[in-house]
Image (cartoon, helix red, strand yellow):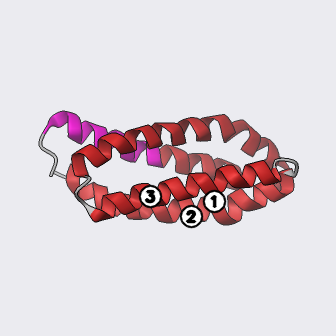
Amino acid sequence: MLHKESQLTFVRQYLELLNTVEQAFNYVENKPLFEQADALHLIMPDLWSSWIQLAVSHDALLDMLGDSPEIQALVEQFRDMVADFSETINVWSFSQEKMIQYVLNRLSPFYREWKTKTELILSPFVRH
């Protein structure tokens, strides 16, 4: 359980960051097909930055709640998702069409599933 206000604030901000990443996916998905490549190119730096923030935050999250197997599993799933994305963009960086399909059909759904699990596990810690 979280006891310090700073821990509660940390988890709340973490959950807000999850929503920000989801909004980036929504931004690309809601664009007409012919604009999706430009939209993806536009959000990519912010997406990487958000993922770096999440990855750095995982150390603190594990320090606070690391005795929970669910938290450990969520962190590992996130690492797997980012590793898969990193490998894919190295392979597909030459093809915007393949990249868009990967983001829309694989990365975004995987992220949303992971986000939902994460919210279900972390939300009880910040409810008053």
- Residue identified by numbered label 1: 107
* Residue at 38% across, 45% down: 58
Eyeballing the image, is 56 above or below 98?
Answer: above
Please say whether residue 125 is one of the residues in the magenta stretch: no
Indicate which label's residue lies in the foreground, 3 or 2.
Answer: 3
Q: For numbered disc 1, what is the local secondary structure?
A: helix
| Quadrant of res 63 | top left
Q: Which mark is residue 9?
A: none
- Calculate the distance from the C-alpha at mark 3 to the C-alpha at mark 2: 13 Å
Q: Which residues are magenta?
A: 4-18
| Residue 45 vs residue 24, the one in the foreground | 45
What residue type is disc 2 on?
Phe
Residue 14 rendering spot, x and y as whole percentages: 37, 43
Mark 1 and mark 2 in contact? Answer it, CB < 8 Å: yes
Mark number displayed over residue 76: 3
Q: Position of residue 28 (x, y in %)?
A: 69, 50
- Give the class, few, some or many, for how many residues have Cα within 10 Å of label 3's Cα (few <14, many ≥20): few
Q: Position of residue 24 (x, y in %)?
A: 60, 46
Disc 3 versus disc 1: nearer the observer? 3
The numbered mark, 3 or 2, whose residue comes first in the sequence reads 3
Where residue 110 is drawn, which disc sits there?
A: 2
Separation of marks 1 and 2 at Cα, in angstroms:
5 Å
- Tell me the quarter of the picture where residue 111 sits: bottom right
Asked if residue 51 is positioned above or below residue 101 in the image, the reply reads: above
- Mark 2 falls on what kind of element? helix
Mark 3 / mark 1, whichever is N-terminal: 3
Question: Dot 2, crowdedness within 10 Å: few (<14), some or many (≥20)?
Answer: some
